[in-house]
Amino acid sequence: MNIAIVCYPTFGGSGVLATELGKALADKGHNVHFITYQQPVRLSGFHANIFYHEVRVPTYPLFDFPPYETALASTMVDVITNNNIELLHVHYAIPHAAAAYMAKQILLKQGKYIPVITTLHGTDITLVGRDKTYKPVVTFSMMESDVLTAVSENLKEETYKNFDINKEIEVIHNFVDVTRFNKKPVDAFRKLIAPNGEKIIVHASNFRKVKRVEDVINAFLLINEKLPSKLLLLGDGPERPAAESICRDCIAINNIKFLGKQEQMEDILPLADLFLLTSEYESFGLAALEAMAAEVPVISTNAGGLPEININGVTGYMSNVGDIEDMCEKAIAILSDTETHNKFKANALEQARKFDIETIVPVYEKLYERLLNKVTASTAMLQD
Ligand code: GMT
């Protein structure tokens, strides 16, 4: 198949998922064309079946806000027309689903029907998309997509709760390449981070308010009072300066490190003894799944779709949003006994295997095939 994928190219989970999906489809022999404003972070190296098309947004003195959506729709039309694209898969509704609708209409006028799949990821529904500034366009473009998918059952429910749509939403959970993440940790690195055998706790996110990074730090400070430990914070975003300033004022500062954006998560996560995710909402929590694939138990909140991946008392524990005392207690329960820790580690890996790339990518492939067959059948009917 010739497939076009539109996503955010950044470290966010939707871009990561879209890029990993495209790479997996290319490995299976499909031609995959990425359309984004920057090379996606997880897209590196040469692959004969992968093509990257940059959306350029020319500036003009009149524009206070350069019209990205118009440039994106025009690039979609160009890429689809010139590369014999059969279907367009957009990740994160805003503004990708609306731009896809525009491209679809333009192509229709030229006699080509391009089926559109929109995958909903999280704040496109639960936060930004619900805002009345965007809601009418998000609602309309979801309805106009040929297929709507959501990355968790929870996100599907949230979509029906927040939007007036009467369209089927298919849940296709996010996935992880377990083989890639399930690496042996490099002892030399562990010694550098935790020279006295301290436990290593990791958090990774885009440091937005919804992640409640201050809870990660405060939960860690409680843990650190009871258990020699180190905290690694991976990623970057608007709340990082505030998080750094909390740490500067605390006595455990030497036990906390901000590592910034990291491309090779599969090299860092296996070093961790525990992953902390304190989000107020998480439609899925791809970062937690990647940690589990690296055999790392997870302490998370019980918000959104997290209970669909983190099984309380099995792969880690869940606490109420903001309950850092409970998070600390659960972390100590896992980390202070080797046998218990090993049991949680093994369970985390077993659970991650249920979301393995080998299982989930074929679900997308089948969806594409089903959609293309439907388009072919209706085109044939129109011609008869
Ligand atoms: O919706 C967002 O906040 C952005 C998005 C992203 O691009 O990182 O994250 C969402 O999509 C991820 C991939 O499907 C999910 O793993 C995250 O849970 C989800 N984030 C939220 O729901 C806050």
Image: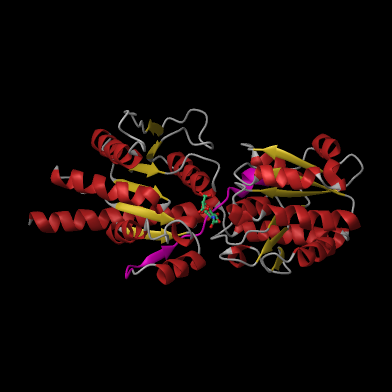
Location of residue 232 with respect to 277 vertically, above or below:
above
In the picture shown, does residue 148 fall above or below 25? below
Q: How far across and how far down the image is residue 28, in percent? A: 44, 42
Instruction: Provide residue 165's location: percent of width, then percent of height.
Output: 33, 68
Q: Quadrant of residue 274?
A: bottom right
Q: Is residue 57 above or below residue 214?
A: above
Total marks placed: 0
In magenta stretch: residue 177? yes
Q: Nearer the viewer, residue 98 or 240?
A: 240
The one of 35 and 347 positioned closer to us in this rendering? 35
Residue at 85% x, 41% y: name it. Answer: 254
Q: Residue 142, percent across and down?
A: 33, 59
Answer whether residue 250 is magenta in the image: no
Q: Residue at x 30, y 48 (%)?
A: 100
| Image quadrant where one finds the N terminus | top left
Q: Residue furthest left?
A: 384
Q: Quadrant of residue 144?
A: bottom left
Residue 240 x/y as whole percent: 66, 44
Viewer-proximal residue among 24 and 280:
280
**Residue at x 62%, y 48% (from the top left corner):** 205
- Is residue 41 visible in the rendered structure shown here? yes
Q: Quadrant of the C terminus?
A: bottom left
Q: Is residue 235 above or below residue 343?
A: above
Q: What residue is shown at x 70% (from left), y 69% (from top)?
A: 312
Q: Is residue 18 left or right of residue 384?
A: right
Q: Is residue 296 visible?
A: no
What colouring style does the render use? secondary structure
Q: Which range of residues does the magenta coloring cover?
A: 165-182
Answer left or right for 237 relative to 99: right
Q: Main secondary structure of the magenta part?
A: loop
